[in-house]
Image (tube, rainbow, N blue to C red):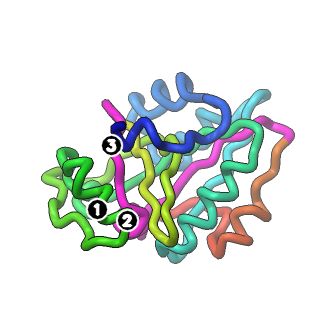
């Protein structure tokens, strides 16, 4: 079974179409948050001192929501290579050495976070732009430094305390 088939997806497919349209417009974080907010959706920005532990805590908490969309602004150069073999990721997940392949991409980019696969204290995160790829939480946290996440929830849901309890801030990044 492929690792992507084992991912625990975030609940609901909230705002996926809206996220794709907003990302295509090339808006900065504040513009994306405004474009995604409205009568149906609330957008909570997340920033702060990103660590793998804080990222895991946040993503684990998001699994407890009824519906959520997650959009991340990433530094692409800090991620694992897009073609990192499943075997290398599975070995790492099971306690082996981290994948040593690094991304050839550069610059900031937006991508949806689709779900997680956790074994012990290690987590792979499904990162989706043109296709889904798995990234170790440690590398993803590093790529979020100076960047952040936009959490899209139904208007009635307020995830501010969830963000704070993860050790992060409910605010836009610079």
- Marks 3 & 1, CB-CB < 8 Å contact: no
Closer to us: mark 3 or mark 2?
2
Closer to us: mark 3 or mark 1?
1
Q: For label 1, count other residues whose C-alpha is less than 10 Å away and answer few (under 14), some (14-19) or many (20+).
A: few
Residue 117 in percent (x, y) is at 48, 52
Residue 165 in percent (x, y) is at 73, 71
From mark 2 to mark 1, how far is it between C-alphas?
A: 5 Å
In the image, residue 140 sits, relative to residue 28, either above or below, namely below
Per the image, the residue denoted by label 3 is 133
Image point (23%, 52%), residue name: 87
Image point (77%, 35%), residue name: 154
Tell which circle, 3 or 1, labels the residue nearer the N-terminal end. 1
Magenta region, residue range = 130-156
- Marks 2 & 1, CB-CB < 8 Å contact: yes
Q: Which of 103 and 96 is in front in this view?
A: 96
Q: Which of 90 and 46 is in front in this view?
A: 90
Per the image, the residue denoted by label 2 is 94
Locate the N terminus by quadrant. top left
Image point (28%, 59%), residue name: 79
Element carrying mark 1: helix
Is residue 143 visible in the rendered image? The answer is: no
Q: For label 2, count other residues whose C-alpha is less than 10 Å away and answer few (under 14), some (14-19) or many (20+).
A: some
Q: Residue 91 carries which label?
A: 1
Q: For label 3, count other residues whose C-alpha is less than 10 Å away and answer few (under 14), some (14-19) or many (20+).
A: many
Q: Residue 51 carries which label?
A: none
Q: Is residue 141 left or right of residue 89?
A: right
In the image, is residue 91 part of the stretch drawn in magenta?
Answer: no
């Amino acid at each position: 079974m492929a690792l992507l088939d084992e991912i625990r997806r975030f609940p609901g497919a909230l705002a996926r179409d809206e996220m794709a349209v907003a990302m295509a417009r090339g808006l900065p974080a504040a513009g994306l948050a405004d474009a995604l907010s409205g009568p149906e959706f609330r957008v909570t920005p997340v920033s702060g001192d990103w660590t793998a532990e804080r990222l895991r805590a946040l993503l684990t908490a998001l699994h407890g929501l009824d519906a959520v969309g997650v959009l991340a602004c990433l530094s692409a150069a800090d991620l694992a290579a897009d073609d990192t073999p499943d075997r290398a990721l599975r070995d790492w997940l099971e306690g082996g050495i981290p994948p040593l392949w690094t991304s050839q991409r550069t610059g900031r980019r937006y991508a949806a976070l689709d779900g997680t696969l956790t074994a012990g204290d290690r987590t792979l995160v499904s990162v989706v732009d043109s296709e889904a790829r798995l990234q170790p939480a440690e590398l993803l946290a590093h790529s979020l430094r100076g960047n952040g996440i936009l959490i899209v929830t139904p208007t009635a849901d307020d995830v501010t305390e969830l963000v704070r309890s993860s050790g992060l801030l409910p605010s836009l990044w610079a």
